[in-house]
Image (tube, rainbow, N blue to C red):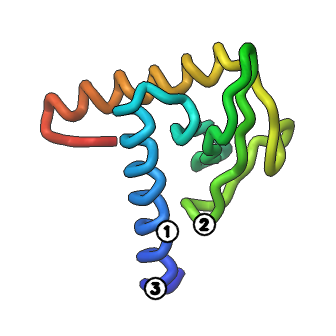
Amino acid sequence: MSEEFLKMIESNLKKLEREDDQAKAKSQLVGRYIREQIADGFAYYKIVKENKKTVRIELVRNIGDDYSVPVWGLKASIQKAYAIKNVGYRDRINEIFSKKGEKK
């Protein structure tokens, strides 16, 4: 991969994390992201709509290897409870690492 491409990927991830932090600060699910382990990397999905029992997610491109969850594809509606659990787990992991001076 070219250095320019790697910088673009890093910039896109930082933007996604900023938007996630902003949504978290407002206690909103819309704007947060879900990260799913796929093969040797991750698929990143942004929550774009919140319903009573589901959320609508869309694949975030140009981050990592651009993996997607096969059953979700580019866009999907998933259970809101699952999204809350996924985001909450990531928040707890980030909290642990931030106490150690790192962020993952």
**Image point (59%, 46%), residue name:** 42
**Image point (71%, 39%), residue name:** 57
Q: Which residue is mark 1?
A: 9
Say if 7 sits above or below 12 in the image. Answer: below
> Which SS class for mark 2?
loop
Among numbered discs 3 and 1, the one appearing first in the sequence = 3
The quadrant where residue 11 appears: bottom left
What is the x, y in percent for residue 30? 57, 36
> Which SS class for mark 1?
helix
The quadrant where residue 15 appears: bottom left
The quadrant where residue 90 appears: top left
What is the x, y in percent for residue 73? 83, 46
Viewport quadrant of the C terminus: top left
Which sits in the foreground, 100 or 25? 25
Circles 3 and 2: CB atoms closer than 8 Å? no
95 vs 65, left or right, is left
Among numbered discs 3 and 2, the one appearing first in the sequence = 3
Q: Residues within 10 Å of mark 1 (few under 14, many from 20)?
A: some
Circles 2 and 1: CB atoms closer than 8 Å? yes
What is the x, y in percent for residue 74? 80, 50
Say if 21 sits above or below 83 in the image. Answer: below
What amino acid type is highlighted by mark number 3? Glu
Say if 15 sits above or below 75 in the image. Answer: below
Q: CA distance from mark 2 to mark 1?
A: 6 Å
Q: Which residue is mark 3?
A: 4
What amino acid type is highlighted by mark number 2? Asn
Which sits in the foreground, 61 or 67? 61
Q: Which residue is mark 2?
A: 62
Q: Residues within 10 Å of mark 2 (few under 14, many from 20)?
A: some
What amino acid type is highlighted by mark number 1? Ile
Q: CA distance from mark 3 to mark 1?
A: 9 Å
